[in-house]
């Protein structure tokens, strides 16, 4: 079976992890944590990086320091992973869901504008499958309305967006930006995440809250509530080694995209689209079955699995999740683009470790099952 994603560990990962073991710095302090935070923040054009144990808690922690009024609304896409909506709910906020652009699968900024109301306090743009949200339009809208931005950049390591005539890297937008370094990301720490910000006071609160708000002068005197959301030095060691290779990882993603595109362009599927104002990293190579294909993504996945190709389905919209319907959320909400692409889309093997021969085998399998 060709795996849908396999991380590439071809640099100094083993050397750095062994250094942690040999020196005893294996917990939540050490030189690699400081280095990883500093280097990743600088890469994204930010002042502060606060490393945490995964991308989900990065979102929860980031929202907690914005001091948004309880019960106020956060506009966000329905087409995203459940982590986003859980972070909103766990901070006693109300998610307001919007549909996505049918070409990029990112939130439609025109629909965000229409979703704004008197209780709107924030927007959570989620960059999808390596392609950025239209941040120029969103930044303008949020400045006009005085609305804060929590940027979910978990899927766009290294992607860029054109804003006011300048290319800006994803992770540089809004009050806070959040990353995941899960095993399938462009750089990985196995599990892990980070919150980025330019605000000094906010960075201090993020640092305190990720580590149970231990006192800075008197350790066991707590002046606020927090969590144990810390990243280990072992994880950060992986991240440092991975970051040293990020340009090579991104080049491989672009090459993968070109090879898939050349082999699949004449089939009845929609291939990844990139807007002229975006530099996508093609985190996952997503395809969408056209209307003339008489079956959906679940059947395509079954047929490809029989050919030895592993895939993953698209996100099921948050508005269609039974757990939230049982909570009384999103009753009668219909978001047609999100509903369509969930049923017609999947992504193909897209890890940096995939070989050219495996890409060719995937192309052959897709062509066979769609012939």
Image: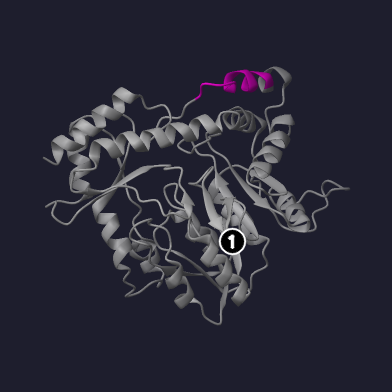
Residue 289 to residue 301: above or below: below
Position of residue 351 measured from the top left corner of the image (x, y, whole percent): 40, 33
The residue depicted at 42 percent of the width and 66 percent of the height is: 108
Q: Secondary structure at mark 1?
A: loop
Which SS type dominates the magenta stretch?
helix
Query: Which quadrant holds the N terminus?
Result: top left
Q: Position of residue 227 (x, y in %)?
A: 66, 50
Q: Which residue is mark 1?
A: 164
* Residue 54 placement, left or right of 268: right
Foreground residue among 361 and 279: 279
- Vertical side of 144 occupied by 218: above or below: above
Residue under the image location 69 percent in, 31 percent down: 32
Range covered by the magenta-colored residues: 9-19
For this view, does 199 lie left or right of residue 336?
right
Quadrant into which the C terminus falls = top left
Q: How many marks?
A: 1
Q: Residue furthest right?
A: 217
Give the color scheme: rainbow, by chain, secondary structure or one colour. one colour
Q: Residue at x 57, y 58 (%)?
A: 165
Q: Nearer the viewer, residue 158 or 34?
A: 158
- Magenta-span inclusion, residue 363: no
Residue 38 left/right relative to 280: right
**Can residue 246 be seen at all in this image of the molecule?**
yes
Residue 139 is drawn in which quadrant?
bottom right
């Amino acid at each position: 079976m060709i795996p849908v994603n396999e991380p590439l560990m071809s640099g100094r990962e083993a050397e750095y992890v062994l250094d942690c073991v040999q020196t005893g710095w294996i917990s939540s302090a050490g030189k690699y944590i400081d280095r990883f935070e500093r280097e990743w923040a600088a890469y994204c054009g930010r002042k502060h990086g606060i490393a945490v144990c995964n991308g989900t808690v990065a979102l929860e922690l980031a929202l907690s320091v914005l001091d948004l009024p309880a019960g106020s609304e956060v506009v966000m896409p329905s087409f995203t992973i459940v982590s986003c909506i859980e972070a909103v709910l766990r901070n006693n906020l109300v998610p307001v869901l919007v549909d996505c652009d049918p070409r990029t699968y990112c939130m439609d900024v025109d629909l965000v504008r229409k979703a704004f109301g008197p209780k709107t306090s924030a927007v959570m743009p989620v960059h999808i499958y390596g392609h950025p949200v239209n941040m120029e339009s969103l930044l303008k809208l949020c400045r006009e309305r005085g609305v804060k931005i929590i940027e979910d950049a978990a899927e766009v390591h290294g992607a860029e967006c054109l804003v006011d005539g300048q290319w800006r890297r994803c992770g540089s937008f809004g009050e806070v930006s959040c990353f995941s370094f899960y095993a399938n990301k462009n750089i990985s720490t196995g599990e892990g995440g980070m919150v980025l910000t330019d605000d000094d006071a906010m960075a201090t609160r993020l640092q305190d809250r990720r580590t149970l708000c231990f006192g800075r002068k008197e350790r066991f005197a707590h002046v606020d509530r927090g969590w144990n959301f810390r990243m280990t030095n072992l994880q950060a060691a992986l991240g440092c080694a991975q970051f040293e290779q990020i340009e090579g990882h991104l080049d491989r993603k672009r090459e993968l995209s070109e090879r898939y595109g050349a082999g699949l362009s004449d089939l009845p599927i929609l291939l990844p689209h990139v807007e002229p104002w975006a530099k996508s990293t093609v985190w996952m190579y997503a395809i969408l079955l056209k209307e003339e294909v008489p079956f959906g993504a679940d059947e395509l996945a079954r047929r490809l699995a029989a050919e030895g190709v592993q895939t993953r389905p698209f996100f099921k919209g948050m508005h269609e999740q039974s757990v939230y319907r049982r909570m009384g959320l999103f009753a009668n909400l219909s978001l047609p683009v999100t509903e369509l692409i969930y049923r017609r889309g999947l992504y193909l093997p897209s890890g940096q470790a995939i070989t050219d021969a495996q890409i060719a085998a995937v192309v052959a399998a897709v062509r066979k099952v769609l012939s």
